[in-house]
Image: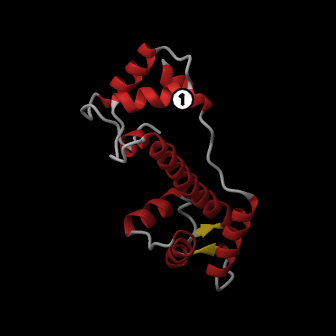
Amino acid sequence: MFFAEVRVRQRKCEAGPSEHRKWVEVFKACDEDKKGYLSREDFKVAIVMLFGYKPSKIEVDSVMSSINQNTSGIFLEEFLNVVRKKKEAQLCWSEIKHIFTAFDMHYRGFLTLEDFQKAFKQVAPKLPERIIIEVFRTETRMFEDAWSPTDITMRC
């Protein structure tokens, strides 16, 4: 089906080398006692420094339970993995919102079938109309007759 093809070709959102260096610096700054790992509290501070919000207990529990249970915290490589995934999700969401906004000509916060058709005519003029309609109907079957950015991210 069409979506399977799209997902295979989907560009991965990635952070650059300067971001990676920043993450390492934040890790080192938050590892004040030079233990080689971040405790739960150290991890919270690092997330505040990198993303500007204090992670919830549930988020911290999720991260800590996903790492080696025999350690007292999160090591650099594990930390970099967590931050990379969070940053990729953040970048992808930002990119999705930007693209969506470009096609939301009437600033309604959703795309109608007509908006969707116009968007596809601009980016894929040779794509058959029936496929455009099929994709729209498949994606909107539980969201009435409009498509919002939230609906799009549910498919990513």
Is residue 136 among the parts visible in the rendering? Answer: yes
Q: Quick check: 151 above or below 117?
A: below
Q: Can you give x and y, in whole percent of width and height, for residue 26 in the image?
A: 65, 75
Does 82 sit above or below residue 110?
below
Q: Residues within 10 Å of mark 1 (few under 14, many from 20)?
A: few
Q: Position of residue 67 (x, y in %)?
A: 55, 59
Q: Is residue 36 visible?
A: no
Residue 40 horizontal/vertical position (percent):
50, 74
Q: Quadrant of residue 21?
A: bottom right
Report the side of 94 relative to 32 (left or right): left
**Residue labelled with disc 1:** 122
**What kind of element bears circle 1?**
helix
Which residue is depicted at the point 36% across and 28% down? 114
Extreme residue in the bottom direction? 33
Q: Is residue 30 left or right of residue 137?
A: right
Residue 97 shown left or right of residue 114 in the figure:
right
Amino acid, disc 1: Gln
Residue reaching furthest to the left: 144
Position in image of residue 141 (x %, y %): 28, 27
Q: Residue at x 51, y 25 (%)?
A: 121
77 or 4: nearer the viewer:
4
Q: Nearer the viewer, residue 144 or 62?
A: 144
Residue at left offset 40%, top offset 44%:
149
112 lies above or below 18: above
| Residue at x-position 37% and y-position 45% | 150
Looking at the image, which is closer to me, 83 or 88? 88
